Image (cartoon, rainbow, N blue to C red):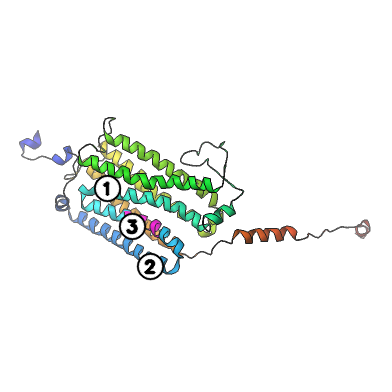
Amino acid sequence: MEGEENGTSVPSCGGSEPPYAQELLGSLDLAGRFLFAILTLMTLIANLVFIEEVFYIYRKIPSSKRSILIWINAAAPVIATTSCIGMWIPRSTMFTDFTASVFFAIVIHKFLLMMIKECGGQKLFLKRFENGHFKISTGPCCCCCLCLPGVRITRRSLFWLKLGTFQFALFRPVFMFLSTVLWTNGNYSLSNLSPKGAAIWISCFVAVLTIIALWPVGIMFQQVRVLLNCKKIIPKFALYQFILILNHLQTAIINILAMQRIIPCAPPLSSSARGAYISHQVLIMEMFLITLISRVIYRRRYSELDPPECIAEEAGVKKQTPVPNVTVSEDGLGGF
């Protein structure tokens, strides 16, 4: 009432629509403009580092691994770029978030393929672990079910692991396209989580697909982490996990806080728009650091693993090496 009597109002705090880019830029003070410049520079540097890494991969890495490594290394720069676009143009948040989510869905599948490639490919992987078993009591599905029996490593079980990640790379874009279509018609809104809304159902389906996709990656990592320790698979897996947590869990937490008005509005940004605004800025800084760390880890040239035949021959030689039996006669003991 006081705002109406004074002839001023703050409609952005009451609505959920983010402002136009010119409105946001016009409301920035000197510190805000400086922050925009720094974050944009971080995004530019991250992309330049990635481009330089692509040239390195094409020069030094075998052709069978190039595509996979480029996809995985592109995860952080792509998320930083989409976040930067969402920061400059708040009304594009829906499209930029969907683009980052779809891209990372493909990266999850590529990371599984990378672990198999680092073992020498599918055939050599099956030879190395022909008598082994996959430990399926791992996260995020069955980390508490320690009594689950192992699954024998065969071509069929490996196919099911690949299918688990591939379905996410296939169906995530489908659900994102459906969400965009419903959003244009006014039927999809993350602020409307009632059973009658489409957002709650699509989010539940995507969550189930995500868990199904992450499970095969965890199973494969548990199987190869000792073998691929010489190729720094643990730091690579840690970076993959960081991107997953920051891009999905962190963003979801910030959005929930914004919808509950715990993050207050700051005209021209409503609470939900400000939550997305903060999420984008934080993601740019985090993805910038991950890009630099990824360059250090993936740029190293690691020696290839020995073929399974060589390992078997070395084991056979060790078994056939006679061990001298040292016998001491009673006469010899008498001399002491």
Which amino acid type is marked by label 2? Phe
Quadrant for the N terminus in the image? top left
Q: Mark 2 or mark 1, which is nearer the start of the sequence?
A: 2
Quadrant for the C terminus in the image? bottom right
Camera-side residue of 37 and 252: 252
Q: What residue is disc 2 on?
A: 55
Mark 1–mark 2 CB contact (< 8 Å): no
Q: What residue is disc 3 on?
A: 77
Callout in the foreground (3, 1): 3
Which residue is located at x 56 percent, y 47 percent?
154
Which amino acid type is marked by label 1? Ile
Q: CA distance from mark 3 to mark 1?
A: 18 Å
Q: CA distance from mark 3 to mark 2?
A: 15 Å
Callout in the foreground (3, 2): 2
Q: Residue furthest top?
A: 195
Callout in the foreground (1, 2): 2
Which residue is located at x 48 percent, y 65 percent?
301
Mark 3–mark 1 CB contact (< 8 Å): no
Camera-side residue of 332 and 176: 176
Magenta span contains residue 75: yes
Q: CA distance from mark 1 to mark 2?
A: 33 Å
Q: Which residues fall within the magenta stretch?
A: 70-78
Q: Where does residue 61 sit, x and y in percent of width and height?
A: 45, 66
- In this orientation, does residue 286 appear? yes
Camera-side residue of 25 and 182: 182
Q: Where does residue 10 sit, x and y in percent of width and height?
A: 13, 40
Which amino acid type is marked by label 3? Pro
Label annotation for residue 278:
1
Question: Does 198 sit left or right of 1 as displayed?
Answer: right
Question: Does 106 sit left or right of 273 as displayed?
Answer: right
